[in-house]
Each structure stands twice: as structure tokens, then as C-alpha cells.
Amino acid sequence: MAEGITENTEWRPKANLALITIAVMLATFVDVLNTSIANVALKTIAGSFSISDDESLWIVTMFLIACSVLLPATDWCCRVFGRKQFFMGCLATFGIAAIICGCAPNFEVMIFGRILQGLGGGCLIPLSQAILLESYPKSEQSKAMAIFSLGVTIAPIIGPILGGYLTTEYCWNYVFFISVPLCIAAFIMVGLYVENPPYLKIVGWHKMDYVGFTFLIMWISTFQIMVDNGQKNGWFDSAYICKLGLCSLIAFIGFVYWELHTKEPLLNLRVLKNWNYTFGTTILTITFAICYGTIAILPQFLQALMGYTAFLSGLAAGPMGIGSLSGAALSAILSKVLDARHQIIMGLLIVAVGCYMFSSLNLNISYANIVIPNILLGVGMTVVIVTATTVIFSTIPKESMTNASSLQNLIKNVGCAIGTSSVGVLVSRYGQIHQSYLIDHLTVLNNNFAERINVLTAQFMQMGQDSITAAQYAYGVIYKQLMQQVNLCAFMSSYKVYALTIIMIIPLSLILRKTD
């Protein structure tokens, strides 16, 4: 923790709050945007570099790992360079890395650029969050978090839409170049309007918790690789995944033990003793995991079963952004009439209803059947994120804000990784279950099945096929319909799991303590 003026709770920045907000939100937006904008371009990039689809996933994986690795060192870096200077350095690094990625002549340079981009972007979110919370008076922190939540919820929705459009209409390079002007604008505005608060002293280069940092790198890297590659390798049926899991577990235990016992930890885990911080972060992490899970599962459903293109499936998630805007406005209204705990419960219930509505879809749906649940998800998630974030940081001292924000975002990143990987796990496992159940009905003892086969066989014979070939075609048609229903049921069951998970964390909201 920084030493100095720790009781200066009345400090306010000199610049206009609106300008500070725009500056930090540009940084937040460009960072979160890059977690999803490249996803839809991976196939195109893979073709450009003559690599496999599996290898192209490292473009996403290495960015996420690099984002998480430097994140816990945010507080230490702020004390070495000064928070404003470090913030500007991260923005400059991010922008330069985006240019490297866009101009990459081969896969190796692309991976280097993505690692550099992740290192620059990993600290932008906790820095932005801490600056907003410190700049706004306590009575207006819910407004600050409403603005912040818009950036972290709308950006991953816009990402696939923008990425699909740029890749289709121009080329994949623009997926990375689009970040450069945003970084330049944010860099200039941060330089002009953001300032270092008096209680965060620049102490220069000082001892770093290298042991904790090493444990952290081992934990995050092995965990991220494990969740990204678990599904295609059969999870713990694979020796490779088991080794990654074991390394991740050992490194995690070592990290926690060391941070709790060293005098100058990289992350002060004792902040978890704060009741609201711990349980609020738990609620927030699970909500973000569900958010990223639903964002990942919807395009898969629309492309696999409804025949949507990558761009159209990304566009279908757009209404969630409308819901997020509505949720921010609703949060401001509810904060005046409801206790924070009740606001969180209302938001969670709205999310659960949205997930449940998705679980009742079929292959004959209209666009409205996608729009309404998406809007509900956007509204509910924004209400939860705004309110929970305000509750979490309401009792955190300002001089501890950067550390608390870094730890919260690290935990949140782990939750988002689990939420994204859960899509493949749930769809695959439920697909096997539903296929086993449905295929039992496809026997000659089932009169409906036998009659359907006879009708299809007759139709193919009328088209000039012999009886044997016609029967094979008939079975092929039935099998295709079976797999469509299997995949549909798997997607719907996954949404039911998401809805049930949200319902299960509602009791956590009730044990949060009231804040002033």
C-alpha cells in the first residue's frame, strides 16, 4: 500500500469529471473490445498464416494470459512510475502492439504482438475503475459504476459485430488497427485530465514480490491453457490436461500461501476479510462468467442450427447492448428507492428469466425470440454489475483501491475464462446425454419411426434411386434431423444451467451488509 496522505477523503481531481470519465472509459472500452473482436477473424487469420484453426486459438489465449499476468502488479507499478504515468505507458504499449499485430508478417510476430498487447491492456481496467471510484464523490459512485459497466458489457458485444464487419468488408488487419485511434485519443485525454491523487506517492523502484509473481505466472498461464484446450482434449481424460491442472493447482496454493505470509505481497489478499468485498466479488464473478458464457453460446447456436453467418450471429447479440443502456438507467432509479441487496436480487432474477427464455427456443423462432431475452440479459447484468461494484468498494479505503480493484479483476478474469470454456463443456456433455436418450426412439419397434423411414424411402425411389440407396438416404435424413434436435436440446439445457446458477447465488445477496 502507498504511504502518505491516507485520510484525505475529500480530495477531488481538478479536471471536469465528464472529461476524466471519457478518458478512462476509452481505455476500458478498447481493452475489453480486444478480448472478443479477433475471435470471428481467427479462421481468416489462420488461412493467411497457413496454420490450423487450433493454432489460431493461441492468438486469443496468449492475449488473455498476458492480460492476467501483469494485472496483480498494477499497484506495485503505480508506486514505481506513478499511476497516471503507468496508465499512459499501458495505453502506448497497447497501441504499438495493435500496430504490430495488424502488420504481422507471420504467426510468430502475431503472437508476440498479442502478448505485448495483453501486457499493456491487462492493467487498464483496474486503473480505470480505481480512477473513477476515487474521482466521484461517494454519493455518486453508483453513477460512476453505471458508466463503467457499460464499457465492460457493451464492448464484448460490439467486438464480434465489428470484427465480422471489418474482416468481411475489408481485411483482418483492420481488426487490430481499429484500436490505434482509440488508444491515441485515450492517451491524450489521460495526459490532459487525469492526475495522481496525493495519497498515492511515487516511491520509485523498490522490492517486488518476485516469488509471488512467479507463482502467479505459473498459475494463470497453466489455468488459461487448460480451460482453452480442455474440451478438445477430453478434459481430465487427457494426461496433458491433467498435468496442466496439477501445475495450476500447485501454483495457486503456493501463490495464496506466499501472499498471506510475506511482508510485502504482490497482492494484499487480506482485503478478502472485508465481508462485502468477498461476497460481492463472488456474485460479480459468477455474473460475468454467465455473461461471457451467453455471449459465446448464442453465436454457436445461431450458426450451427439457424444458418446465420458469423457477422449476423454477432449482430444478433446487439440487443444486449440496448439492454445494458436500459440497465444503467434502471440502476440509477432503483438506487433511490431500493436497498442495494434488493437491487442485486432484482438484477439476478432478470438474468435468470432471460436465460430461461433462451432455454425454451426451437428451430422455428423469429428474430424477436432472440431480441427479448438478450435485452433482459443486458438489463439484469448491468443492474447487478453496477450495484455489486458499488457495494464492493464502498468500504475500501482509497489508498487500497488499486490493490482491491486489481485482485477483483484477477478473480473476475478467472471466472470469465471458466464461463467461456463452460460453453463447450455443457453443449458437448448435454449433446451426448440427449443423443443417447433420443436415439432409443429410433428403432423399427417405433411405428412412427418405421412409417417415416418408409415415406422417405418411397420419395427417394420416386426420384430414381434404387431401394437400398433410397433407404440409406432416408436414414441419413433422419440422422440429420436427430443431430439438429440433439444440438438444440444441448444448447437449451446449457441455458437452463445458467439460469439455475444465477438463482443459486441469490442468497449471497442477502448476506451483504448495508452500506451508507
Image (cartoon, rainbow, N blue to C red):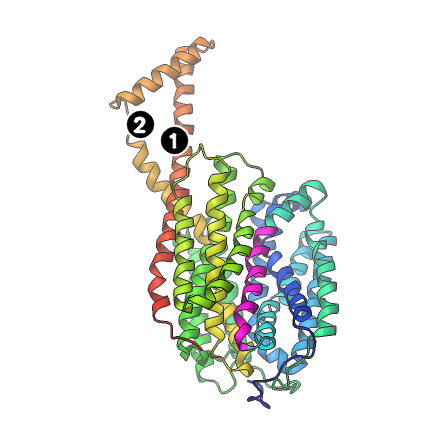
Q: Residues within 10 Å of mark 2 (few under 14, many from 20)?
A: some
Q: Secondary structure at mark 1?
A: helix
Quarter of the image with the C terminus is: bottom left
- The answer to which quarter of the image holds residue 27 is bottom right
Q: Residue furthest left?
A: 445
> Residue 173: where, in percent of width, then height?
71, 49
Residue matched to label 2: 442
Q: Residues within 10 Å of mark 1 (few under 14, many from 20)?
A: some
Q: N-terminal of the two: label 2 or label 1?
A: 2
Q: Amino acid at mark 2?
A: Leu
- Secondary-structure class at tag 2: loop
Q: Quick check: 436 above or below 13?
A: above
Residue 152 at x, y = what percent?
56, 60
Measured along the vertical axis of the image, is residue 464 above or below residue 451? above
Most foreground residue, 275 or 440: 275
Is any part of residue 416 visible from this angle? no
The image quadrant where one finds the N terminus is bottom right
Question: Is the residue 72 above or below the residue 347 in the image?
Answer: below
- Is residue 145 a member of the stretch shown in magenta? yes
Start and end of the magenta stretch? 138-158
Whether residues under marks 2 and 1 lie with C-beta atoms below 8 angstroms apart, the answer is yes
- Determine the CA span between mark 2 and mark 1: 9 Å
Task: Kindly identify the residue that appears in the image at 42 percent across and 63 percent down.
Answer: 344
- Residue type beneath disc 1: Leu
Q: Which residue is located at x 74 percent, y 73 percent?
A: 192
Q: Which residue is mark 1?
A: 482
Image-based side of 151 in relation to 258, left or right: right
